[in-house]
Image: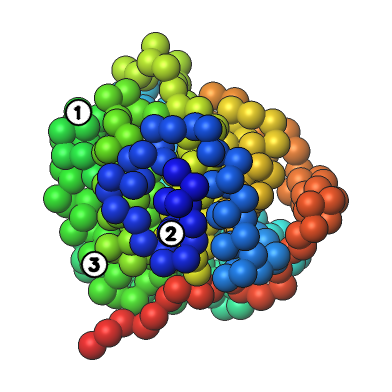
Amino acid sequence: MREIIKKAAKTNNLTEEEITLLLENSSFNGELFAAADFTRKQNVGDGVHLRALIEYGNICQNNCFYCGIRAAKKDVKRYRLDTETTLKAAALAKNLGYKTIVLQSGEENAAPLNEFLQIIKEIKNMGLALTLSIGEKTYQEYLAYREVGADRFLLRIETTDENLYQTLHPGMNLQNRLRCLKDIKKLGYETGTGIMVGLPGQTAKSIAKDILFFKELDADMLGIGPFIPCPGTPLENEKGGSLETALKVMAISRLIMPKINIPATTAMEAIEKNGRIKALQSGANVIMPNVTPQNERKNYALYPGKPGILQTPEEFLNSLKQTLSQIGRFVSQDAGMSLNYRPIEK
Ligand code: 5AD
């Protein structure tokens, strides 16, 4: 096991069998996390990039079995922020010193495109980097967002296991999701993907394949979090993932993709207080503070236990800065582009 960790740190390469072994064996977790932390420090440094998350809307046409805002969940109060409210949240983020806005929403294909393009333009005019996390779209739509200035796009693959994907995503298919990621790459977005860890039926081998997929895609960013069963969804009685395993998936990813950006995800904090800090010490270098208007946050509940619903953006930032300094880290002052990013190869 120790040899595998050493090899990963040295060569940034592992086989599917080696990753599977690491995932199945927990006696060397401490060493794995320490190695990932060292690789993080060497390659992306001690600065933590903050991305202001605006949960732009929870209207969704999909029915992903795990998700708390799936279309069939009728007790969700649906919303989409109007332009003014969205830009106000972005301005607040800018005032707090954040350099990047992430607009995230459910997948709402009927959302008015022009209004959305206008929001992108205005955020770009504020001098901020912009990440979109709004799901599967057509090439033409990805192109339109890119042409008005969107810089980055997040679309988790969720799992590369075709059967598992099919079971969890009625009416969707893995091929289209892969097509989306290819389009996003082709258009020169900094590309983010990722998975949930601990999905029912997910195996160590299947996660190993996911990790190798991240590398093959040459992702610039990776969001990895534990699956958390959500009441009122088909998976409400399932077991859910552990922080430990999610951290392992993240740490292995850091070892084989040393230069990418990896957030300490909110789901990690939701299942364990200080989960995000542990993540920052096991390979992560990004945090996504929530700047969604207070009155809508509770409606964007993908899973239960989401932290900080009542905390103001100012309060969050102050306590985060304190915690970061306690672990020898600091808030990065640059836009935090992925050091792995290469513009489109023509
Ligand atoms: N538990 C953990 N993560 C979830 N997501 C959606 N539902 C859940 C859940 N119940 C994740 C998905 C999605 C991201 C925005 O949130 O991976 O891509």
Q: Nearer the viewer, residue 326 or 100?
A: 326
Residue at the image point whose x is 33% and y is 67% from the top? 218
Quarter occupied by the N terminus: top left
Quarter occupied by the C terminus: bottom left
Q: Mark 1: few, some, or many residues within 10 Å (few <14, many ≥20)?
A: some
Q: Is residue 46 visible?
A: yes
Q: Is residue 132 visible?
A: no
Residue at the image point whose x is 29% and y is 31% from the top? 203
Looking at the image, tell me whether mark 2 or mark 1 is earlier in sequence order: 2
Asked whether disc 2 touches disc 1, contact meaning CB atoms under 8 Å apart, the reply is: no
Asked if residue 223 lies left or right of residue 44, the reply is left
Asked if residue 345 lies left or right of residue 295, the reply is left
Residue at the image point whose x is 80% and y is 58% from the top? 328
Q: Nearer the viewer, mark 1 or mark 3?
A: 1
Residue 183 marker: 3
Q: Secondary structure at mark 3?
A: helix
Q: Nearer the viewer, residue 211 or 235?
A: 211
Residue located beneath label 1 in the image: 167
Distance from label 2 to label 1 (Cα)? Answer: 35 Å
Q: Could you say where residue 29 lies in the image, as x and y percent from the top left? A: 55, 39
Callout 1 amino acid: Thr
Asked whether disc 3 touches disc 2, contact meaning CB atoms under 8 Å apart, the reply is: no
